[in-house]
Amino acid sequence: MPPTDASPHTLTQQIIARHDRAMSINYGRYPVAMVRGEASTLYDADGKQYLDLFAGFGASVLGHCHPDLVNTINDQARKLWHVGNLFHTEPQTRAAEAISKFGFEGRSFFCHSGADANVAALKLARLHGQKNKGKTTGGRYKVISTLGSFHGRSFGAMEATGQPSVYEGFGPLGPGHVHVKFNDLSAIESSIDDETVAVLVEPIQGEGGVNVPDDNYLANLRELCDDRDLVLIFDEVWTGVGHTGEYFGHQHWDITPDVMTLAKGVGGGLPVGVTHLSPKFADLFDWRTHGHAVHATTLGGNCLAMAVTATIFDVLDRDHLVGRAKKLGTGITDRLNAFAKDHSVIKAVRGRGLYLGVELDLDASSGRFATAGDVVKACMDRGVLINAVQGKVLRIAPALVIEQDELDRGLDVLEDVLKG
Ligand SMILES: Cc1ncc(COP(=O)(O)O)c(C=O)c1O
Protein backbone atom coordinates (compact mmCIF):
# COMPACT_ATOMS: atom_id res chain seq x y z
CA MET A 1 0.00 0.00 0.00
CA PRO A 2 1.53 3.40 -0.94
CA PRO A 3 2.12 5.74 2.03
CA THR A 4 -0.60 8.28 2.67
CA ASP A 5 0.35 11.84 3.65
CA ALA A 6 -0.17 10.89 7.30
CA SER A 7 2.00 7.77 7.24
CA PRO A 8 5.77 7.89 7.79
CA HIS A 9 7.72 8.29 4.54
CA THR A 10 11.37 7.86 5.42
CA LEU A 11 12.97 4.90 7.12
CA THR A 12 13.81 7.22 10.03
CA GLN A 13 10.17 8.24 10.39
CA GLN A 14 9.08 4.62 10.28
CA ILE A 15 11.56 3.62 12.99
CA ILE A 16 10.46 6.54 15.18
CA ALA A 17 6.77 5.77 14.72
CA ARG A 18 7.34 2.13 15.73
CA HIS A 19 9.51 3.25 18.66
CA ASP A 20 6.81 5.58 19.94
CA ARG A 21 4.28 2.77 19.96
CA ALA A 22 6.49 0.09 21.50
CA MET A 23 9.00 1.79 23.77
CA SER A 24 8.78 3.41 27.17
CA ILE A 25 9.54 7.05 26.39
CA ASN A 26 12.22 7.56 29.05
CA TYR A 27 14.48 9.64 26.85
CA GLY A 28 14.10 12.81 24.85
CA ARG A 29 15.69 11.60 21.61
CA TYR A 30 16.73 13.49 18.51
CA PRO A 31 14.65 12.56 15.45
CA VAL A 32 17.52 10.53 14.06
CA ALA A 33 17.88 6.72 13.87
CA MET A 34 21.46 5.49 13.69
CA VAL A 35 22.04 2.30 11.74
CA ARG A 36 25.79 1.93 11.24
CA GLY A 37 29.09 3.14 12.64
CA GLU A 38 32.73 2.97 11.70
CA ALA A 39 35.44 4.51 13.93
CA SER A 40 34.24 8.12 14.45
CA THR A 41 31.60 8.12 11.73
CA LEU A 42 27.93 7.29 12.19
CA TYR A 43 25.30 6.81 9.48
CA ASP A 44 21.59 7.31 10.00
CA ALA A 45 18.72 5.40 8.47
CA ASP A 46 18.42 7.92 5.65
CA GLY A 47 22.10 7.74 4.76
CA LYS A 48 23.24 10.97 6.42
CA GLN A 49 26.78 10.84 7.80
CA TYR A 50 27.86 12.25 11.17
CA LEU A 51 31.23 12.91 12.75
CA ASP A 52 30.87 11.56 16.28
CA LEU A 53 32.64 13.72 18.86
CA PHE A 54 30.77 12.21 21.80
CA ALA A 55 31.18 8.47 21.16
CA GLY A 56 28.02 7.22 22.89
CA PHE A 57 28.66 9.10 26.17
CA GLY A 58 32.32 8.19 25.86
CA ALA A 59 31.55 4.48 26.01
CA SER A 60 32.67 3.74 22.47
CA VAL A 61 36.21 4.48 23.54
CA LEU A 62 37.73 2.74 20.50
CA GLY A 63 35.11 4.14 18.16
CA HIS A 64 32.37 2.22 16.42
CA CYS A 65 32.97 -1.38 15.33
CA HIS A 66 36.74 -1.35 15.93
CA PRO A 67 38.15 -4.28 13.92
CA ASP A 68 40.00 -5.76 16.92
CA LEU A 69 36.83 -5.70 18.99
CA VAL A 70 34.79 -7.15 16.13
CA ASN A 71 37.31 -10.00 15.79
CA THR A 72 37.40 -10.55 19.55
CA ILE A 73 33.65 -10.76 19.89
CA ASN A 74 33.33 -13.04 16.87
CA ASP A 75 36.04 -15.39 18.17
CA GLN A 76 34.57 -15.44 21.65
CA ALA A 77 31.03 -15.87 20.32
CA ARG A 78 32.10 -19.13 18.72
CA LYS A 79 33.75 -20.37 21.95
CA LEU A 80 31.65 -19.47 24.97
CA TRP A 81 29.19 -16.73 25.92
CA HIS A 82 28.15 -17.27 29.47
CA VAL A 83 28.31 -19.85 32.21
CA GLY A 84 27.66 -17.85 35.36
CA ASN A 85 29.99 -17.17 38.21
CA LEU A 86 30.05 -20.69 39.63
CA PHE A 87 32.89 -21.32 37.19
CA HIS A 88 36.16 -19.65 36.30
CA THR A 89 36.51 -18.18 32.83
CA GLU A 90 39.69 -16.79 31.35
CA PRO A 91 38.31 -13.59 29.73
CA GLN A 92 37.18 -12.32 33.16
CA THR A 93 40.58 -12.85 34.63
CA ARG A 94 42.28 -11.17 31.68
CA ALA A 95 40.04 -8.13 32.03
CA ALA A 96 40.69 -7.91 35.78
CA GLU A 97 44.44 -8.29 35.26
CA ALA A 98 44.41 -5.43 32.75
CA ILE A 99 42.64 -3.13 35.22
CA SER A 100 45.26 -3.94 37.86
CA LYS A 101 48.09 -3.53 35.39
CA PHE A 102 47.04 -0.15 34.01
CA GLY A 103 45.28 1.07 37.14
CA PHE A 104 46.28 -0.14 40.57
CA GLU A 105 46.89 -3.55 42.03
CA GLY A 106 43.53 -4.81 43.22
CA ARG A 107 40.58 -7.10 42.60
CA SER A 108 37.68 -6.50 40.25
CA PHE A 109 34.01 -7.30 40.62
CA PHE A 110 32.19 -7.20 37.28
CA CYS A 111 28.63 -6.03 36.77
CA HIS A 112 26.72 -4.20 34.02
CA SER A 113 26.64 -0.45 34.51
CA GLY A 114 28.01 2.52 36.37
CA ALA A 115 25.05 2.50 38.75
CA ASP A 116 25.67 -1.20 39.49
CA ALA A 117 29.35 -0.58 40.10
CA ASN A 118 28.61 2.27 42.50
CA VAL A 119 26.00 0.26 44.39
CA ALA A 120 28.61 -2.46 44.90
CA ALA A 121 31.03 0.18 46.21
CA LEU A 122 28.40 1.57 48.59
CA LYS A 123 27.60 -1.93 49.86
CA LEU A 124 31.30 -2.57 50.40
CA ALA A 125 31.51 0.66 52.41
CA ARG A 126 28.65 -0.56 54.61
CA LEU A 127 30.53 -3.80 55.26
CA HIS A 128 33.56 -1.75 56.28
CA GLY A 129 31.38 0.31 58.61
CA GLN A 130 29.94 -2.85 60.17
CA LYS A 131 33.38 -4.28 60.74
CA ASN A 132 34.85 -1.02 62.02
CA LYS A 133 32.01 0.49 63.99
CA GLY A 134 34.01 3.32 65.56
CA LYS A 135 31.94 5.09 68.21
CA THR A 136 28.64 3.72 66.90
CA THR A 137 26.88 0.62 68.13
CA GLY A 138 25.08 -0.23 64.89
CA GLY A 139 27.97 0.48 62.52
CA ARG A 140 29.00 3.42 60.37
CA TYR A 141 26.99 3.89 57.18
CA LYS A 142 26.99 7.50 55.96
CA VAL A 143 28.53 8.40 52.63
CA ILE A 144 29.59 11.90 51.63
CA SER A 145 29.36 12.76 47.95
CA THR A 146 29.35 16.06 46.09
CA LEU A 147 26.74 18.46 44.78
CA GLY A 148 26.47 18.28 41.01
CA SER A 149 27.79 14.71 40.97
CA PHE A 150 26.19 11.87 39.04
CA HIS A 151 26.49 8.27 40.19
CA GLY A 152 23.58 6.47 38.53
CA ARG A 153 19.85 5.99 38.85
CA SER A 154 19.36 2.84 40.90
CA PHE A 155 18.59 3.06 44.63
CA GLY A 156 21.85 3.80 46.38
CA ALA A 157 23.58 5.34 43.36
CA MET A 158 20.61 7.68 42.96
CA GLU A 159 20.75 8.93 46.55
CA ALA A 160 24.51 9.40 46.28
CA THR A 161 23.97 11.61 43.23
CA GLY A 162 24.18 15.29 44.11
CA GLN A 163 21.42 16.46 41.76
CA PRO A 164 17.88 16.60 43.19
CA SER A 165 16.26 16.13 39.76
CA VAL A 166 17.67 12.59 39.75
CA TYR A 167 16.02 11.49 43.00
CA GLU A 168 12.96 13.75 43.34
CA GLY A 169 9.74 11.77 43.19
CA PHE A 170 11.35 8.50 44.24
CA GLY A 171 11.15 8.82 48.01
CA PRO A 172 11.45 7.54 50.61
CA LEU A 173 15.15 7.58 49.83
CA GLY A 174 17.75 5.39 51.48
CA PRO A 175 19.35 7.07 54.48
CA GLY A 176 22.90 8.19 55.05
CA HIS A 177 23.71 10.31 52.00
CA VAL A 178 25.29 13.72 52.58
CA HIS A 179 26.07 16.11 49.70
CA VAL A 180 28.70 18.82 49.93
CA LYS A 181 30.26 21.28 47.53
CA PHE A 182 32.69 19.76 45.02
CA ASN A 183 36.33 20.81 45.27
CA ASP A 184 35.92 21.93 48.88
CA LEU A 185 37.83 19.75 51.31
CA SER A 186 36.70 21.65 54.39
CA ALA A 187 33.07 20.98 53.39
CA ILE A 188 33.82 17.25 53.48
CA GLU A 189 35.78 17.55 56.70
CA SER A 190 33.02 19.40 58.52
CA SER A 191 30.39 16.90 57.37
CA ILE A 192 32.17 13.87 58.80
CA ASP A 193 30.54 12.51 61.93
CA ASP A 194 30.79 9.30 63.93
CA GLU A 195 28.57 7.50 61.43
CA THR A 196 30.49 8.44 58.31
CA VAL A 197 32.13 5.54 56.51
CA ALA A 198 33.01 6.68 52.98
CA VAL A 199 33.54 9.52 50.54
CA LEU A 200 32.46 9.07 46.93
CA VAL A 201 33.73 11.51 44.27
CA GLU A 202 34.34 11.73 40.56
CA PRO A 203 37.96 12.83 39.99
CA ILE A 204 36.55 15.15 37.31
CA GLN A 205 32.85 15.88 37.75
CA GLY A 206 31.18 14.92 34.48
CA GLU A 207 27.44 15.54 34.38
CA GLY A 208 28.03 18.46 36.74
CA GLY A 209 29.78 20.33 33.92
CA VAL A 210 33.23 18.74 33.44
CA ASN A 211 34.62 20.30 36.61
CA VAL A 212 38.29 19.69 37.30
CA PRO A 213 39.22 20.09 40.98
CA ASP A 214 42.13 22.14 42.31
CA ASP A 215 45.42 20.30 42.19
CA ASN A 216 45.59 19.36 45.87
CA TYR A 217 41.92 18.50 46.44
CA LEU A 218 42.10 14.77 45.77
CA ALA A 219 45.49 14.26 47.43
CA ASN A 220 44.25 16.03 50.57
CA LEU A 221 41.07 14.00 50.43
CA ARG A 222 43.18 10.83 50.29
CA GLU A 223 44.96 11.92 53.50
CA LEU A 224 41.72 12.85 55.20
CA CYS A 225 40.17 9.46 54.42
CA ASP A 226 43.27 7.69 55.74
CA ASP A 227 43.19 9.75 58.95
CA ARG A 228 39.49 9.11 59.56
CA ASP A 229 39.31 5.50 58.35
CA LEU A 230 36.94 6.37 55.50
CA VAL A 231 36.68 4.35 52.31
CA LEU A 232 37.72 6.60 49.43
CA ILE A 233 35.65 5.68 46.37
CA PHE A 234 36.42 7.26 43.01
CA ASP A 235 33.64 7.08 40.46
CA GLU A 236 35.70 6.76 37.28
CA VAL A 237 32.78 5.84 35.06
CA TRP A 238 33.64 8.81 32.82
CA THR A 239 37.30 9.35 33.67
CA GLY A 240 38.41 5.72 33.45
CA VAL A 241 39.86 3.91 30.44
CA GLY A 242 41.94 6.55 28.76
CA HIS A 243 39.72 9.46 27.82
CA THR A 244 41.43 11.97 30.09
CA GLY A 245 44.92 11.20 28.77
CA GLU A 246 45.74 8.81 31.62
CA TYR A 247 44.41 5.29 31.91
CA PHE A 248 42.41 6.38 34.95
CA GLY A 249 41.57 9.86 36.19
CA HIS A 250 43.19 9.50 39.61
CA GLN A 251 46.57 9.05 37.89
CA HIS A 252 46.59 12.78 37.08
CA TRP A 253 47.02 13.41 40.78
CA ASP A 254 49.24 10.46 41.56
CA ILE A 255 47.00 9.01 44.23
CA THR A 256 45.09 5.77 44.55
CA PRO A 257 41.54 5.37 45.81
CA ASP A 258 40.41 2.40 47.90
CA VAL A 259 37.71 1.59 45.41
CA MET A 260 37.39 2.65 41.77
CA THR A 261 34.18 2.20 39.81
CA LEU A 262 34.14 1.94 36.02
CA ALA A 263 31.59 1.60 33.23
CA LYS A 264 31.15 3.30 29.83
CA GLY A 265 34.58 2.94 28.13
CA VAL A 266 35.47 -0.26 29.97
CA GLY A 267 32.87 -2.08 27.87
CA GLY A 268 33.59 -0.21 24.64
CA GLY A 269 29.83 -0.01 24.04
CA LEU A 270 28.84 -3.25 25.78
CA PRO A 271 27.19 -3.08 29.22
CA VAL A 272 30.10 -3.55 31.61
CA GLY A 273 30.53 -2.13 35.10
CA VAL A 274 33.51 -2.72 37.36
CA THR A 275 34.09 -2.20 41.06
CA HIS A 276 37.83 -2.41 41.50
CA LEU A 277 38.91 -2.91 45.11
CA SER A 278 42.28 -2.28 46.69
CA PRO A 279 43.66 -5.34 48.52
CA LYS A 280 42.90 -3.70 51.89
CA PHE A 281 39.16 -3.78 51.15
CA ALA A 282 38.80 -6.71 48.74
CA ASP A 283 38.39 -9.29 51.51
CA LEU A 284 35.13 -7.66 52.55
CA PHE A 285 33.51 -9.14 49.45
CA ASP A 286 35.28 -12.50 49.80
CA TRP A 287 32.58 -15.14 50.15
CA ARG A 288 34.89 -17.16 52.39
CA THR A 289 34.81 -14.35 54.95
CA HIS A 290 31.02 -14.70 55.17
CA GLY A 291 30.37 -18.31 54.24
CA HIS A 292 28.06 -17.20 51.44
CA ALA A 293 28.07 -14.72 48.53
CA VAL A 294 27.48 -11.20 49.85
CA HIS A 295 27.40 -9.47 46.50
CA ALA A 296 26.86 -11.13 43.14
CA THR A 297 25.21 -10.91 39.76
CA THR A 298 24.28 -13.48 37.13
CA LEU A 299 25.57 -11.93 33.92
CA GLY A 300 28.34 -9.72 35.31
CA GLY A 301 31.64 -10.83 33.81
CA ASN A 302 30.08 -12.78 30.93
CA CYS A 303 32.64 -14.04 28.43
CA LEU A 304 31.66 -11.86 25.47
CA ALA A 305 31.85 -8.60 27.40
CA MET A 306 35.02 -9.56 29.23
CA ALA A 307 36.87 -10.58 26.08
CA VAL A 308 36.04 -7.14 24.70
CA THR A 309 37.15 -5.37 27.90
CA ALA A 310 40.49 -7.18 27.88
CA THR A 311 41.03 -6.36 24.20
CA ILE A 312 40.26 -2.67 24.79
CA PHE A 313 43.25 -2.46 27.15
CA ASP A 314 45.43 -4.39 24.68
CA VAL A 315 44.59 -1.94 21.91
CA LEU A 316 45.00 1.17 24.09
CA ASP A 317 48.46 -0.09 25.01
CA ARG A 318 49.52 -1.33 21.56
CA ASP A 319 48.42 1.84 19.75
CA HIS A 320 49.56 4.27 22.47
CA LEU A 321 46.09 5.77 22.45
CA VAL A 322 46.13 7.17 25.96
CA GLY A 323 49.17 9.42 25.47
CA ARG A 324 47.70 10.36 22.10
CA ALA A 325 44.46 11.43 23.82
CA LYS A 326 46.46 13.77 26.03
CA LYS A 327 48.14 15.36 23.01
CA LEU A 328 44.98 15.68 20.95
CA GLY A 329 43.16 17.16 23.95
CA THR A 330 45.83 19.81 24.44
CA GLY A 331 45.43 20.76 20.78
CA ILE A 332 41.65 21.13 21.11
CA THR A 333 41.98 23.14 24.32
CA ASP A 334 44.56 25.50 22.79
CA ARG A 335 42.45 26.01 19.70
CA LEU A 336 39.23 26.72 21.62
CA ASN A 337 41.04 29.02 24.07
CA ALA A 338 42.43 30.97 21.11
CA PHE A 339 38.90 31.20 19.65
CA ALA A 340 37.59 32.35 23.03
CA LYS A 341 39.94 35.34 22.97
CA ASP A 342 37.93 36.83 20.09
CA HIS A 343 34.55 35.27 20.83
CA SER A 344 33.20 35.81 24.32
CA VAL A 345 30.53 33.14 23.75
CA ILE A 346 33.13 30.69 25.08
CA LYS A 347 33.65 31.40 28.76
CA ALA A 348 35.96 28.54 29.73
CA VAL A 349 37.43 25.33 28.38
CA ARG A 350 37.86 22.60 31.00
CA GLY A 351 38.78 18.95 31.27
CA ARG A 352 41.69 16.71 30.41
CA GLY A 353 42.68 14.80 27.29
CA LEU A 354 39.71 13.94 25.13
CA TYR A 355 37.19 14.64 27.86
CA LEU A 356 36.45 18.33 27.57
CA GLY A 357 33.78 20.79 28.65
CA VAL A 358 33.25 24.14 26.97
CA GLU A 359 31.30 26.55 29.15
CA LEU A 360 29.29 29.06 27.15
CA ASP A 361 28.29 32.58 27.97
CA LEU A 362 24.84 32.35 26.42
CA ASP A 363 24.21 36.09 26.93
CA ALA A 364 27.11 36.73 24.56
CA SER A 365 25.38 34.78 21.77
CA SER A 366 23.10 37.74 20.91
CA GLY A 367 20.02 35.65 21.60
CA ARG A 368 20.98 32.92 19.11
CA PHE A 369 21.27 30.20 21.75
CA ALA A 370 18.95 29.87 24.73
CA THR A 371 20.86 26.82 25.96
CA ALA A 372 23.95 24.84 25.03
CA GLY A 373 21.51 22.28 23.60
CA ASP A 374 20.77 24.73 20.76
CA VAL A 375 24.46 24.63 19.82
CA VAL A 376 24.39 20.82 19.88
CA LYS A 377 21.40 20.82 17.50
CA ALA A 378 23.02 23.31 15.12
CA CYS A 379 26.17 21.17 15.01
CA MET A 380 24.10 18.03 14.43
CA ASP A 381 22.33 19.67 11.49
CA ARG A 382 25.82 20.10 10.03
CA GLY A 383 26.74 16.49 10.75
CA VAL A 384 28.79 16.87 13.94
CA LEU A 385 27.76 15.24 17.22
CA ILE A 386 28.61 16.81 20.57
CA ASN A 387 26.71 16.97 23.85
CA ALA A 388 25.55 19.52 26.42
CA VAL A 389 25.12 19.40 30.20
CA GLN A 390 23.83 21.81 32.80
CA GLY A 391 22.29 23.96 30.06
CA LYS A 392 25.50 25.85 29.37
CA VAL A 393 28.39 23.41 28.99
CA LEU A 394 29.22 21.61 25.76
CA ARG A 395 30.91 18.24 26.12
CA ILE A 396 33.40 16.87 23.65
CA ALA A 397 34.51 13.27 24.19
CA PRO A 398 35.40 11.57 20.91
CA ALA A 399 36.71 8.05 20.60
CA LEU A 400 40.44 7.74 21.21
CA VAL A 401 40.93 6.62 17.62
CA ILE A 402 39.75 9.94 16.22
CA GLU A 403 42.01 11.39 13.52
CA GLN A 404 43.45 14.90 13.73
CA ASP A 405 41.76 15.94 10.48
CA GLU A 406 38.41 14.76 11.83
CA LEU A 407 38.90 16.83 14.96
CA ASP A 408 39.84 19.84 12.83
CA ARG A 409 36.69 19.38 10.77
CA GLY A 410 34.50 19.05 13.86
CA LEU A 411 35.99 22.15 15.47
CA ASP A 412 35.58 24.13 12.23
CA VAL A 413 31.86 23.37 12.39
CA LEU A 414 31.60 24.15 16.12
CA GLU A 415 33.39 27.47 15.74
CA ASP A 416 31.26 28.37 12.71
CA VAL A 417 28.09 27.61 14.65
CA LEU A 418 29.28 29.66 17.63
CA LYS A 419 30.23 32.60 15.38
CA GLY A 420 26.76 32.54 13.77
C1 LIG B 1 30.24 9.56 36.70
C2 LIG B 1 29.12 8.62 36.43
N1 LIG B 1 28.87 7.63 37.31
C3 LIG B 1 27.88 6.75 37.10
C4 LIG B 1 27.08 6.81 36.00
C5 LIG B 1 26.00 5.82 35.79
O1 LIG B 1 26.37 4.94 34.81
P1 LIG B 1 25.28 4.01 34.08
O2 LIG B 1 24.44 4.91 33.24
O3 LIG B 1 26.10 3.03 33.31
O4 LIG B 1 24.50 3.35 35.18
C6 LIG B 1 27.31 7.82 35.06
C7 LIG B 1 26.47 7.93 33.86
O5 LIG B 1 26.48 8.88 33.14
C8 LIG B 1 28.35 8.75 35.28
O6 LIG B 1 28.58 9.76 34.43
Image (cartoon, grey):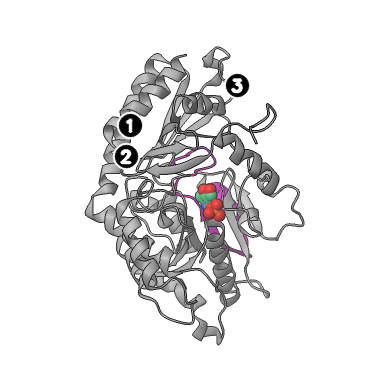
Determine whether 272 is above or below 20 in the image. Answer: below
Q: Amino acid at mark 1?
A: Leu
Instruction: Tell me residue 60's x, y (percent).
Output: 41, 48
Nearer to us in this view, 183 or 275: 275
Q: Amino acid at mark 2?
A: Ile
Determine whether 192 is above or below 376 in the image. Answer: below
Nearer to us in this view, 394 or 21: 21
Q: Which mark is residue 407?
A: 1
Instruction: Tell me residue 54's x, y (percent).
Output: 44, 39
Residue range (magenta): 186-213
Q: Residue at x 28, y 55 (%)?
A: 315
Q: Which mark is residue 402?
A: 2
Element type at mark 1: helix
Q: Is residue 210 magenta?
A: yes
**Residue, far front:** 1
Q: Which residue is mark 3?
A: 370
The answer to whether marks 2 and 1 mark residues whose Cβ atoms lie closer than 8 Å is yes
Instruction: Tell me residue 70's x, y (percent).
Output: 35, 56
Q: Amino acid at mark 3?
A: Ala
Nearer to us in this view, 17 or 268: 17
Q: Quadrant of residue 55?
A: top left
